[in-house]
Amino acid sequence: GTLASLLLHLPDEWRRLKLQMNSPPYTVYYFEAFGGRAEAAHLMLAASGTSFEKKGKDELPSAAFQCPALRDNSTGLVLAQTTVIAKFLGRRLGFDVEGGDEEIIAMKIADDIADIWKEGYSLRKQLDMARCLEWLDCMPDGSRNRGRFVRLLSVINESRSVGNGKGQTFLTGSEVKYVDFLLLNAIRTMEHCYGVEKVAQCLSQESCGNLKDVVENVKGLDKVKAYLETSPPVLYESISAAKLFGNAVRSRSISPPKPPLQTAASISKRHSKGFVDKAVASRVDMSAPPGHTSVKKRSTINVGALHTGSIHDFNKEQRKTEQVENAWGAMFAGGGKK
């Protein structure tokens, strides 16, 4: 009976072994056009000289709820969650922080880095410039939201004192660990969303210690540098700093994005539900046929922004533009209105 069972399963076992022999040690599942949250895993594998393959989210194993995910092709183990993947690869590739309080502090730092990623990315997606400016402010005033980026960086730096990592080449000492790759990915993500200059300004705050140097040290590793030269962008273009602020980061002239355009039909529908200000609705001829928007009071409408079936509230846009210009002028030019 045992021999018959072995013979029955031999073809499946042979196919599994053959697949292992022909596959790289690891498979990383994520969006193919950019690195995103999977980039830390890519960097660790590249830095260790370990071959791996990339597969898209459409091939995500059933054991993972969402990307990023990692499959150990030697065992079939599938893991998800960015920090879990990083910790696992750290243990496998020699980048782990082992033993005592240092190991726990490294896990805590990894979660702090995840907070930076989540908060910074979420704000950028919301297109809320006021909140973005508040989050990026280099002078926290003790309020809940102002300067949270710098505060998170400062907390990370302060946590390093437990394992005598403060001031060292990398986060936890003289050797690169998995948390260093997580930090590099988070900083690259924030640079993509808000601009290299602004992120560098935040990292240069005294409370952040030498975190800026740590990022450069990881980026300067030979195999990491080689990987980044040919790697896909960290995120998609539509969420870049250039798309949000125009040329603000480069030329300090603000060109904020326009709010979504609305058709007369959609304005009418939202007005009936109380979602649109009566003053806005009153300036649009709701009886106009589809594809035609008739403006009743042109003095209060951004006529140059009118498109077929679309309209802007000029006054609201003008106020928003002035606020952004003043805030970014203060940050980048060292002056401007408050």
Image (cartoon, grey):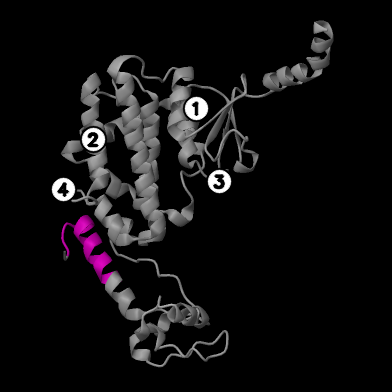
**Amino acid type at image mark 4:** Gly
Q: Which residue is found at the position 51% from the left and 42% from the top?
A: 232
Q: Residue 74 placed where, x, y %? A: 62, 19
User: Do the CB atoms of the residues marked 4 and 1 lie less than 8 Å apart?
Assistant: no
Pointer 3 residue: 33
Q: Which residue is found at the position 29% from the left and 25% from the top?
A: 105
Residue 5 occupies which quadrant of the picture? top right
Task: Name the secondary structure under disc 4.
Answer: loop
- Which circle, 2 or 3, is nearer the viewer? 2
Return the mark for residue 142. Answer: 4
Q: Whole-Å distance between the Cαs marked 2 and 3?
A: 33 Å
Taking the image as drawn, is residue 210 in sight? Answer: no
Q: Is residue 166 left or right of residue 191?
A: left
Q: Which residue is found at the position 53% from the left and 91% from the top?
A: 288
Return the mark for residue 303. Answer: none
**Amino acid type at image mark 2:** Val
Mark positioned earlier in the residue sequence (2 or 4): 4
Return the mark for residue 46. Answer: 1
Tell me if mark 2 has few (under 14), some (14-19) or many (20+) residues whose alpha carbon lies within 10 angstroms of its own: some
**Magenta stretch contains residue 325:** yes
Mark positioned earlier in the residue sequence (2 or 3): 3
